[in-house]
Amino acid sequence: MRISRRRFLATVGAGVTLGGAGCVGDDGATAGAGSEPDSSTGTSAASTATDQNDRPEPPTAASRLHLDYGTGTLEENIVSGGVPKDGIPAIDDPTFADTPPDGLAPDDPVFGVVRDGEVKAYPQYILVHHEIVNDTIAGDAVAVTYCPLTGTAQGFERGPVEFGVSGRLVNSNLTMYDRGTDSWWPQMLATGIKGPLTGESLREFRVIWTTWSHWSGVYPETRILTEDTGFSRRYGVDPYGQYNEKRGYYSSTRTLFEPLQSDSRAHPKAVVIGTRTETGALAFDKETLLSQGVLTGRIDDTPYVAIADTDLASGYVYANPESMSVAASDDGYMIDGTAYDADSLPLDRTLSFDAMWFAWAGFYPGSGYVN
């Protein structure tokens, strides 16, 4: 059953002081997890182009990711998130510091990126008010994105364009738009479902969901996103609850919007580390993985292995077509008598990311689930 965002937050946000039902938009109005497209606001760079062929495009992958639905079905299931297009403003001019903001506690979530030797961290308590950071890392134009309703932090190459919050949701997931072609991209799918680039998949990179203490412990040289975003926001007040300790929306069994599919194999907000390829999808329970160290599963006939990274409280997924034995040891992970770090097994690593189970199962009802 679908309920309103205001009613939901009123019932699950006990103990959390809210300024409204969601993030605050540019005009000071209260905004929700997404925003409704409105041609009168948030004018994109694409609107100034006179010829569609002249519009810049984000770089797309050589192959398309697997979808369990046709793009037409996904477009039909787009819903309004509650405020105008760009009502939740992306950060287009981010600033970074060598020391953490005063509002960041050691156990607070951050989203970490390492790219060509450059290391950055993006606090969840800042991104919950913006959802997209258009950044440059090691000379590459990228977007670091976060959807609070699905618990997903993902990275995309953006090339000559920026991404913005379209204001629409699919399966509760942030639907981005690119400011070149105005194509719409559900974050988790990384695939266009509306506009000139429908059916194309974006080029992605890994974003690690971890805590500030874990991230800074492994990467003391990291730079961290500051609250100097160019916007006035109540940073430190999460409109959906909190992660440290977890409560509100993040722990409730309820969702604000009806999922595309329901699956009772796990708590709706249980965290999985999921991977998807051109042929299918697979999810591993994160808590179980961190406890056991190694989990195995399959996409079609191909074996995959998930490896825990206890230093970062995260994990990685590798294709393992030859079913090589992988075992945790005091020195790392053993394959044929040689020890390897979690992130450097001699196997083909596939892109993976954290997600709430209800969202993963909604987008990928055919996905295997390993717990």
Image: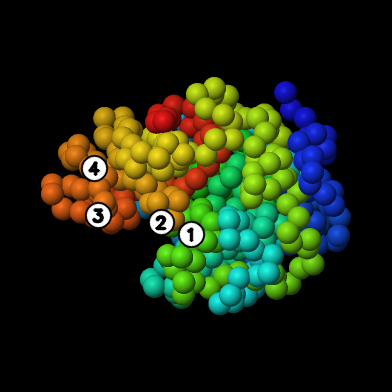
- Residue situated furthest left in the rendering: 336
Quadrant of the rendered structure where residue 143 is? bottom right
Quarter of the picture containing the N terminus is top right
Distance from label 3 to label 1 (Cα)? 19 Å
Q: Of the two numbered discs 1 and 4 on the same chain, state the one appearing first in sequence.
A: 1
Percent position of residue 218, x then y: 42, 65
Task: Give the numbered dot on residue 214.
Answer: 1
Q: Which of 243 and 271 is in front in this view?
A: 243
Task: Give the numbered dot on residue 66.
Answer: none
Q: Of the two numbered discs 3 and 2 on the same chain, state the one appearing first in sequence.
A: 2
Distance from label 4 to label 3 (Cα)? 11 Å
- Label 3 close to label 1 by CB (< 8 Å): no
The residue under label 3 is: 331
Q: Nearer the viewer, residue 289 or 96?
A: 289
The amino acid type, in three-letter code, at marker 4 is Ala
Distance from label 3 to label 2 (Cα)? 13 Å
Q: Which residue is drawn at 85% across and 52% down?
A: 19
Quadrant of the rendered structure where residue 12 is? top right
Percent position of residue 64, x then y: 41, 45
Please say whether residue 154 is visible from this viewpoint: no
Q: Of the two numbered discs 3 and 1 on the same chain, state the one appearing first in sequence.
A: 1
- Label 3 close to label 2 by CB (< 8 Å): no
**Quick one: SS at disc 2?**
loop
The residue under label 2 is: 311
The residue under label 4 is: 327
The amino acid type, in three-letter code, at marker 2 is Asp
